Image (spheres, rainbow, N blue to C red):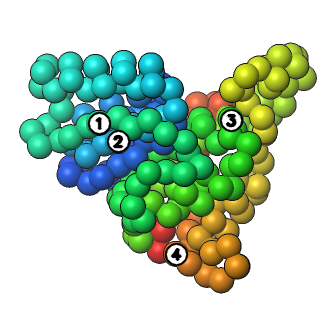
Amino acid sequence: MLTVDFDRLGLRPGERILDMGAGAGRHAFEAYRRGGDVIAFDMDAEELGRVRDLFVAMKEAGEAPEGAEADVKEGNALSLPFADGEFDRIVAAEVLEHIHEDVQAIRELVRVLRPGGTMAISVPRWLPEVINWKLSADYHHAEGGHIRIYTDHELIDKVTKAGRFNDGTPGDAMIFEGKDYAHGLHAPYWWIKCA
């Protein structure tokens, strides 16, 4: 299930898009179908191997438009191996709740987003997460599991402030454009634009 509305993301054919924390690739595959120049980024090399194989199968089956490109890149969200402003669009779906240094990861996303670009971030909804945490300590103590529960205000604040340099002076402004829900119990997502 996609947790990002690609029509609202505004991806156009040929635009460069990063799926940060791509996992099994569901958002990267949709971006490829829409003609994006896609990078599926994750720290799990085995998972990325399967994503690469599916990119190849999609191309062979004619599921991606002529000229669309897709590749994978292994790495750490805290130090993205991309140039400043390299991407027109970014998807970070269901990943920030797993990262201890979430502000550093958000700053990296802001750094690689071009001015005027759009980023879609999704995290689990607050109430279902609280319930899951109360039902099972293993849910949030598992290796690689969810380590935080975001409130709307907290995530919006962290992302909009990430456009500032470390000394607090303004950099590229990150403007909150709205939120929506992928489905009733899970995955609100926020739309943020780099001014």
Which mark sits nearer the N-terminus, 1 or 3? 1
Q: Amino acid at mark 2?
A: Ile
Which mark sits nearer the N-terminus, 3 or 4? 3
Place of residue 143 in the rendered image (x, y in percent of width and height, measured from the top left): 73, 22
Distance CA(mark 1)–CA(mark 2): 5 Å
Q: Kindly state the secondary structure of the residue where label 2 is placed.
A: strand
Which mark sits nearer the N-terminus, 1 or 2? 2
Horizontal placement of 72 versus 183: left or right? Answer: left
Which mark sits nearer the N-terminus, 1 or 4? 1
Q: Amino acid at mark 3?
A: His
Place of residue 58 in the rendered image (x, y in percent of width and height, measured from the top left): 21, 23
The residue pinned by badge 3 equals 98
Q: Amino acid at mark 1?
A: Asp
Q: Nearer the viewer, mark 2 or mark 4?
A: 2
Circles 1, 2 touching at the beta carbon (< 8 Å):
yes
Q: Is residue 37 above or below residue 55?
A: below
Total number of numbered labels?
Answer: 4
Is residue 9 visible in the rendered structure shown here? no
Circles 1, 3 touching at the beta carbon (< 8 Å):
no
Q: Amino acid at mark 4?
A: Asp
Residue at 48% over, 55% down: 119
Horizontal placement of 109 versus 60: left or right? Answer: right
Horizontal placement of 77 versus 81: left or right? Answer: right
Pointer 4 local density, CA inside 10 Å: few below 14, some 14–19, many at least 20: many
Which mark sits nearer the N-terminus, 3 or 2? 2
The residue pinned by badge 1 equals 71
Q: Nearer the viewer, mark 1 or mark 4?
A: 1
Front residue (pair 18, 133): 18
- Mark linked to residue 172: 4
The residue pinned by badge 2 equals 39
Residue at 25% over, 46% down: 37
Place of residue 124 in the rendered image (x, y in percent of width and height, measured from the top left): 68, 35
